[in-house]
Amino acid sequence: MKRQRLNSQESLKKYREALVKARDPNQKVITVCGGTGCIAYGCKKVVEAFKTELEKQGLTDKVKLLVTGCHGFCERGPLVVIRPENLFYQRVKAEDVPEVIEKTVKNGELIERLQYEGKDKKKILKEEDIPFYAKQQRTIFGFNGYVDPKSIDDYIAIGGYSALPKALLEMTSEKIIDEVKKSGLRGRGGGGFLTGAKWEICAAQADQTKYIVCNADEGDPGAYMDRSVLEGNPHSIIEGMLICAKAIGASHAYVYVRNEYPLAVENLGIAIEQARELGLLGKKILGSDVDFDITVNRGGGAFVCGEETALLNSLMGKTGEPHQKPPYPAISGLFGKPTIINNVETWANVPLIISKGSAWFASIGTEKSKGTKIFSLVGKINNTGLVEVPMGMTLREIVYDIGGGILKDKKFKAIQTGGPSGGCLPEEKLDLMVDFDKLTEAGSMMGSGGMIVMDESTCMVDLARYFIDFLKGESCGKCTPCREGLKQMSGILNRICDGNGTEADIETLKDMSETVKDASICALGGTAPNPVLSTIKYFRNEYEAHIRDKKCLAHTCKKLIKFEINQKCTGCTRCVKTCPTTAISGKVKTVHNIDQGKCIQCGVCVDRCPFEAIDVD
Amino acid sequence: MTKEITITVDGRKVKAAEGLYLLDVLKRNNIYVPSLCHHDQVHPYGVCRICIVEMELNGRRKVMSSCNLKIADGQVFHTTSEKLTKERKILMELMLARSSGAKEVIELAQRLGVEETRFPKEDDGCIMCGLCVKACEQVVGVSAIGFESRGPNRKVSAPFDVEAERCIGCGSCVFICPTNFIKMEDKNHVRKIPLWHVELKMKQCKSCGPDIAPEKQLEYIRNKVKLPENFFDTCLNCRP
Amino acid sequence: MDNAKVDKIVEKHKKDSCQLIGILQDVQKVFNYLPKSALDHLAKKLDIPESQVYNVATFFKAFSLNPRGKHIVHVCMGTACHVRGAKRIMEDVARELSIPEAGGNTKDMEHTVEQVNCVGACALGPVIIYDGEYHGSMTPEKTLKLFKK
Ligand SMILES: Cc1cc2nc3c(=O)[nH]c(=O)nc-3n(C[C@H](O)[C@H](O)[C@H](O)COP(=O)(O)O)c2cc1C
Ligand code: SF4
Ligand code: FES
Ligand code: FES
Ligand code: FES
């Protein structure tokens, strides 16, 4: 269908009304999550099965099939939600599809085996009653379950692009900036800088050419909310940038998308095309004097390119080398012009603030951290996925009420927030209210919202080493403290993990951390030592165990562990066959033995042994 | 034209033109701050970080490099705090570990009170100051060499680490290198810069005989400033 | 012929050197890696120094200057996968294919193994992507099966 351009507020209103009128609120909709997690679980086959089955049954007119972005509860994928009742089915396979249509869609019967089962073994009917969702406040992420990301009409029908005419035609630039300032919105990309204040600085620059950039580089390994918003609801980002365009007087934007996110690039591309068709991008948008268009750029796989000055360099065809700030991008950014760069989630908040008002936004959250935040709750936790909660919720609520506690009911050990630049918080900090400042006070960070839960089987020294090794490899290598400092810190941590640490090492690490933090050019080096400092602060005993007793309390540091076969061994010989170094020997039906000289501590035998006959110490 | 402004350095008022780099202003006022990767001929790159100072910002002190910091009116700096001394020492330890044999590094380390490094020593003559790359780009205008890779693997190299095609053999990189890491040799009418894998034929003076410069360089200059074809046939001394 | 392919990509990006990363990505898609001759030609077409192209091509992890195998295997080493045992999985892959633990090509050029940091499917960690197809909740046994085809 060729769409006509919408050239006034009125025409957009009419367009929306026509869409809404054509949609029956009681229409049966089968929503299948098509996010990356669910794709990995095979949801594409489920979608195909629904298509064929609906056709076979002649239901294509009566039942709508909606393939959406991520619903958040990726752990249980592929997810199917049947609306308007919001019936929730999990782990749906293609084979289940005919039954779902026959029983549930046609006759309203439930299929128990596909339902979610609560802790008390009771089946839960509706999406919103599942504990994982019940405590969330999904003001941004909730839309994902209702729109086909490849359809601008879906977004408009649920009220999307309604902040746009307001901003473009009814509000002045000052008023928009004022609203964003009053809302208290802080950047979701890590720094937590006040978005409105940044816009104000940029708007005040005399330069006629200004740029807007959306930072979708999402480099935090273990976080994927930006990806899911971009994949699932790209128009909200476009609308946010359009509003800023009016506020600061920019006419072009770049979206810098991480290399590993092809689906986000695809959906965003489609969204931009559709917005152009409707005249929501282009010249004189909705009859206003705002011209605006968007270019999508793909990254090349470098964490440092999430840093804004590095990102801008790479947008200009150079390597991702940061430079010292000031000058800040808001004053001198892309091609030396004033540039506003915000994170995906920050952009997604903007239309809501304009349409619902700053007072509404400011009513959510804590004193200095307003609104909601999406976290990526992963690691050793039962309900892995993306959760959106109001700022100020405690870690405990997130981990236990929403996350359903630790995998296999093991003991909670720590939670890493803020990604590689953040810190590890121990059990005592579980009642910490999560907001920008509280996390920083505790020695961690909000970062972009990664939350990695760890149980007793994670070694904290090894974790610190993991992060430093990661950052060492991701450092751009431009400045001495980051390039050389992280190399040396990595050397020390590796030595400790190998059992060759010395008493002086902990102090050296602390000493160096300070210099690396202060003297580095950008915040990669500037925050890199955080995981080391926080693990030393909260888990010093583990460092000392490695150094003094040559023991790894979590039994993961290879050089410090030994595998031995105990009396439970039945001589089944399974381990003999799997051991890659033929270190295990013994006669059938007698207790076997491991040759320590040959053992490479790979642990394959432990996995293989059905009798728990292999001890790790 | 430029406005004169006042900044405060270690409690002392210093007047200077707005927009100058702090390190230059400090030097002019005989305030010593160490520097390594800074050179008057190229834009400050600000990478060795040894020139750090503290700037007062919203009631706190922020550590910044001074060589690439443009000054503005009313700014307050500290150049000698305990924190800076300690951090400069650790930076020197790090550089000493990387380039344990470089004379300039050893000397500066000693000047800042560092005799030994706690870290395992390597002997990489390159301290990654980037001056060669920047000189080739900004002074010569050729960009024959550049950086390669990233993080600890970063190094300066000719593209693909084979003969630098664009190199004209002018030797600017050799002269600007603070540690003498880039070697150059003129022998048998050939100039060699092994690091960039180049060997260039030298042009001799038609009247007195000795090498003037690589043919490629003279050609480059001739094209750039539009000199006559036979301009470089004779050396400076033999010219009428 | 190869140069013509590069020309086409450069035209698609309107000869804009700011699009260098995107251009390199497209070049790599065509050749499966970044051959020197293609990059030399590219630099001339875009009128930028080879050193800039080489710098960018070696800076970003997505690019390879060496030929790669028939099948591309990405092992996620992101934090979520790490705490769920990605290192073990990587060790198993390396042992099975006789390549270094940091990744690389197999001798027969059947496989190229690369470590990546988070592919955005953290809920399924540890994750392996085999020729673009996601394999979640990897165990050592599942890993071996993947290559024993
Ligand atoms: C090493 C490093 C990595 C970063 N990665 C990201 C990222 O992946 N996404 C992001 O939005 N911001 C990232 N940032 C923060 C950006 O520099 C910048 O502050 C942010 O894009 C500003 O947008 P905001 O105000 O909306 O948060 C990173 C910063 C550093 C130092
Ligand atoms: S801190 Fe690290 S990443 Fe940032 S500029 Fe310095 S070397 Fe590059
Ligand atoms: S991808 Fe389906 S719920 Fe996240
Ligand atoms: S002299 Fe300023 S950073 Fe090197
Ligand atoms: S950490 Fe492996 S997919 Fe995110």
Image (cartoon, rainbow, N blue to C red):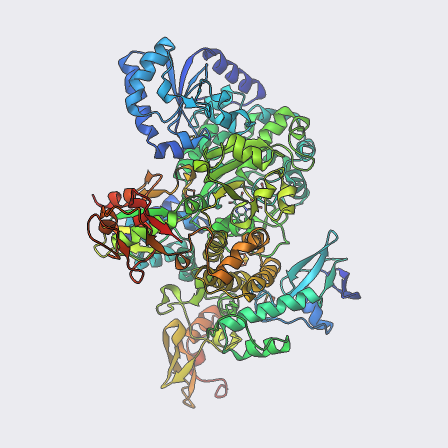
Closer to us: A491 or B175: A491
The quadrant in which the N terminus of chain A is found is top left
A67 to B235, vertically: above or below: above
In the depicted view, which residue is nearer to us: B24 or A554? A554
Q: Quadrant of residue C35?
A: bottom left
Q: Nearer the viewer, residue C67 or B114?
A: B114
Q: Residue at x 63, y 41 (%)?
A: A436
Residue A55 vs residue A207: left or right? left
What residue lies at 73% left-to-right and 64% top-to-bottom?
B78
Vertical side of A54 occupied by A317: above or below: below
- The answer to whether one can see residue A319 in this image is no
- Counting from the top left corner in percent of width and height, residue A166 is at 62, 25
Q: Position of residue A339 (x, y in %)?
A: 59, 45
Q: Position of residue A274 (x, y in %)?
A: 45, 28
| Residue A341, position as x, y percentages in the image | 57, 43
Does residue A556 appear in this view?
yes
Image quadrant where residue C55 sits:
bottom left
Whether residue A611 is situated above or below residue A472 in the rendered picture: above
Residue drawn at the location 54% of the way across and 62% of the way down: A479
* Left or right: residue B184 compared with residue B103: left
Residue A289, quarter of the rendered image: top right
Residue farthest top in this picture: A107
**Image quarter (top left, top right, bottom left or bottom right) of the C terminus of chain A:** bottom left
